[in-house]
Amino acid sequence: MSREVEELQKIIDSHNRIVFFGGAGVSTESGIPDFRSQDGLYNMQYKYPPEQIISHTFFVHDTKEFYRFYKDKMLITNVEPNPAHKKLAELEKAGKLLAVVTQNIDGLHQLAGSKTIYELHGSIHRNYCTRCRKFFGPDYLKESDGIPKCDACGGVIKPDVVLYEEGLDSDVINGAVRAISKADCLIIGGTSLVVYPAAGLIDYFNGDKLVLINKSATTRDSMADLVIREPIGQVFSQIEVR
């Protein structure tokens, strides 16, 4: 165990209102690609850049191409939680973690057993008909040919994920802000903190300890009480819940 991980253990042991704020790096160890790394979605070659494809305008005007990319690169369900997801669920069960605030859409925190989760960018596991609002799980989308259509009314189905040009859900934002403002310790992991407005939520933290766990530098490193430059699953696999 490194000196930094030992310090993290001490911080976790001495705090009981912890909030975790996570990004794509939390799920890369489960096999889900992030967006901005060398092998991330932003560096893959498509007819259009990914940030254009996963926009509201593109979904409306070229729904077929949107779904070709979405099903291929974002609708990932054959993955399992890694030690980071599992340890956070353990911390919540032990009464030490108030909430998980995540930018991820993969549902791995729920699969690991976490209960209080604020999904800032939605989830691939929720999909709705744009006409009648009927709910569909991810398997329905994966098994459909081309554009997924509602089996009740024929309307186009849209994933409940926040696309570019769309606003974040106000109830989710408010819940995340409440949790972060109540925290005595905020652990930020697996995020470059460049996506707004999500990254701006950490400004509501007024607690005792700020921890940053990310393989690369972030703009908030100088504010942190502890910075760890190791893979987050590897870090949390060494933490004991007590």
Image (tube, rainbow, N blue to C red):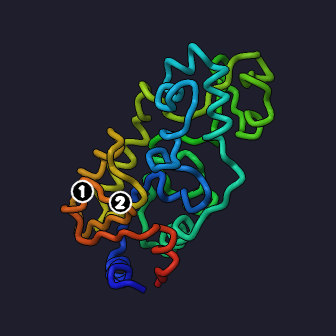
Residue under the image location 61 percent in, 57 percent down: 31
Foreground pick, 25 / 162: 25
- The local secondary structure at tag 2 comes to loop
Image location (x, y in percent) of residue 46: 57, 30
Foreground pick, 171 / 239: 239
Image location (x, y in percent) of residue 140: 77, 35
Q: Amino acid at mark 2?
A: Ser
Image location (x, y in percent) of residue 16: 36, 73
Image location (x, y in percent) of residue 169: 44, 35
Q: Amino acid at mark 1?
A: Arg
Q: Is residue 94 visible?
A: yes
Is residue 81 shown above or below 176?
below
Q: Residues within 10 Å of mark 1 (few under 14, many from 20)?
A: some
Q: Residues within 10 Å of mark 2 (few under 14, many from 20)?
A: few
Q: Is residue 118 visible?
A: no
Which residue is denoted by mark 1 in the rendering?
A: 220
Q: Are marks 1 and 2 in contact (CB under 8 Å)?
A: no
Residue under the image location 43 percent in, 42 percent down: 172
The image shows a total of numbered marks equal to: 2
Q: CA distance from mark 1 to mark 2?
A: 12 Å
Is residue 30 shown above or below 153?
below
Which residue is denoted by mark 2 in the rendering?
A: 216
Residue under the image location 75 percent in, 36 percent down: 142
Is residue 65 shown above or below 176?
above
